[in-house]
């Protein structure tokens, strides 16, 4: 960092630490505001595992750039209602893992499903988890056993970390901010190799994007920032090597934590299924995007922010999303090819021959939280394309936060536009393994209607 930038950051850090309105007084009996608790754990695999996300990888990961982490933020409103946000440097929490973590949290802490949000960063340098992405790698039984061991450990750590965050609840204040960062590029509408030249020439890039960096800061009774939660709609795919890392969201969180010591930074991936950080593929670029996001958060926190009243409402539902089963002829043709699509087709053909009955719908998780009078936070499962974030800003509120990759990641979730255009982001079922050819065409309408139904119930 150059000297002038360092001085700028000193000024911004000083502004954030010193000029905050001192409304929250010390630990007070009968406190009527928010309470917040934070905890975190290292989740870097201890044994060799495959990193998730790229079918082109040839072998398990063999080292780390930095530790992978799982973090929990517990919130308690003035009326005692509680909720927990869990974020992690993983591609996505599979359905089974999410269910097991939530069962334990209900049993130990009485938290209902709607009060737990599991948000992944979608790093492509985190481990493969149980029952997700099995067809894209040549996994042997030893590898599958190692993945199961790691997944059980991750679930135990998630429940334990959330428990510690709940035990750490203490008076706090929450304030909403919004920044922006422009490294996300619509990967369906721009040729990756041409993006740097277009940017340099000031030519516009194509296709929908959502460059918002929405989030909130959490401050203790001394007005000291203890946590920051922020999101961005872009694939965490700068790196594709064999070292564990949180990719650019990992670097962004480390950067924020080094700029404000004692503060925990938590990232949730937005609707970035059709967005890539471009250019990419170097550690230097990964750090640069991390810093760019951290700058966006710091600058937004230093501006006047909106304080949230201490009320909390939550809703969760599962929507039966229908899909078309693959035709046998399609599977036979694909099975004769090579790579992961052939492995997927061969597995499905074997299942078909042994009489496995495939479901023709998926229980898709939709969650909505409302913090204070009007801060809506939507959490959608799957790899959600950016149209959803843009539509929900129109249909719910301009300041809505929309997390994708939340609570379960089972396939790509196309908008009607992407469904009609087709291509990878219209489903990519062979990646995650669902026995599906394509989603029902009404997928976008059904998901948006369900979000509206839940949001209305919280109004
Ligand atoms: Zn992805």
Image (spheres, rainbow, N blue to C red):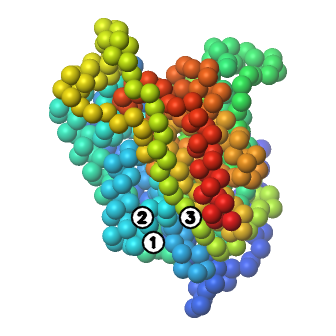
Spatial CA span between label 2 and label 1 = 6 Å
Observer-nearest residue: 287 or 3? 287
CB at disc 3 and ligand 1 closer than 8 Å: no
Label 2 and label 3: CA atoms lie apart by: 17 Å
Looking at the image, is mark 2 or mark 3 earlier in the sequence?
Answer: 2
Q: Which mark is residue 162?
A: 2
Where is 196 relative to 275, above or below? above
Give left or right: position of 387 versus 57. right
* 315 displayed left or right of 242: right
> Picture coordinates of residue 304 (x, y %)?
81, 62
Camera-side residue: 426 or 19?
426
For the residues bearing labels 2 and 1, Cβ distance under 8 angstroms: yes
The answer to whether residue 358 of the structure is visible from this angle is yes
Q: Residue at x 34, y 71 (%)?
A: 108
Instruction: Judge depth for marks 2 and 3 and give the one in front.
Output: 3
Q: Which residue is mark 1?
A: 166
Please give the residue where the numbered disc 3 appears in the rendered image. Answer: 314
């Amino acid at each position: 960092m150059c000297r002038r930038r360092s001085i700028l950051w000193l000024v911004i850090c000083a502004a954030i630490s010193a000029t905050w309105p001192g409304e929250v007084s010390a630990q007070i009996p009968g406190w009527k505001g928010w309470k917040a608790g934070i905890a975190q754990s290292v989740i870097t695999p201890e044994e060799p595992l495959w990193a998730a996300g790229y079918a082109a990888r040839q072998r398990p990961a063999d080292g780390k750039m930095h530790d992978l982490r799982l973090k929990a933020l517990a919130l308690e409103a003035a009326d005692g209602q509680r909720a927990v946000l869990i974020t992690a440097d993983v591609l996505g929490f599979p359905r089974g893992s999410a269910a097991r973590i939530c069962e334990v949290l209900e049993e130990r802490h009485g938290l209902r499903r709607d009060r737990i949000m599991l948000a992944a960063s979608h790093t492509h340098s985190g481990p493969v988890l149980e029952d997700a992405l099995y067809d894209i790698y040549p996994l042997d039984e030893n590898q599958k056993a190692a993945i199961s061991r790691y997944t059980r450990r991750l679930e135990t750590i998630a429940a334990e970390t959330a428990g510690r965050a709940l035990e750490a609840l203490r008076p706090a204040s929450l304030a909403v901010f919004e920044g922006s960062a422009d490294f996300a590029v619509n990967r369906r509408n721009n040729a990756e190799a041409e993006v740097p030249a277009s940017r340099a020439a000031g030519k516009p890039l194509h296709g929908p994007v959502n460059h918002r960096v929405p989030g909130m800061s959490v401050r203790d009774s001394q007005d000291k920032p203890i946590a920051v939660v922020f999101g961005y709609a872009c694939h965490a795919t700068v790196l594709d090597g064999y070292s564990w890392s949180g990719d650019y969201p990992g670097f962004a969180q480390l950067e924020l934590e080094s700029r404000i010591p004692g503060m925990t930074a938590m990232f949730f991936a937005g609707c970035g299924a059709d967005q890539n950080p471009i250019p990419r593929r170097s550690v230097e670029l990964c750090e640069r995007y991390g810093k760019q996001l951290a700058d966006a958060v710091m600058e937004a926190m230093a501006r006047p922010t909106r304080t949230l009243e201490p009320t909390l409402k939550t809703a969760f539902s599962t929507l039966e999303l229908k899909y078309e089963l693959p035709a046998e002829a399609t599977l036979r043709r694909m099975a004769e090819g090579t790579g992961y699509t052939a492995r997927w087709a061969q597995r499905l053909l074997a299942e078909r021959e042994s009489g496995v009955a495939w479901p023709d719908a998926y229980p898709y998780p939709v969650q909505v939280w409302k913090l204070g009078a009007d801060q809506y936070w939507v959490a959608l499962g799957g790899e959600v394309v950016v149209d959803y974030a843009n539509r929900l800003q129109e249909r719910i509120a301009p300041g809505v936060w929309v997390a994708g990759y939340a609570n379960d990641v089972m396939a790509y979730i196309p908008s009607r536009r992407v469904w009609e255009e087709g291509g990878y982001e219209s489903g990519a079922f062979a990646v995650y393994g669902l026995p599906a050819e394509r989603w029902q065409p009404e997928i976008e309408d059904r998901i948006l209607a369900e979000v509206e139904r839940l949001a209305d119930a919280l109004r």
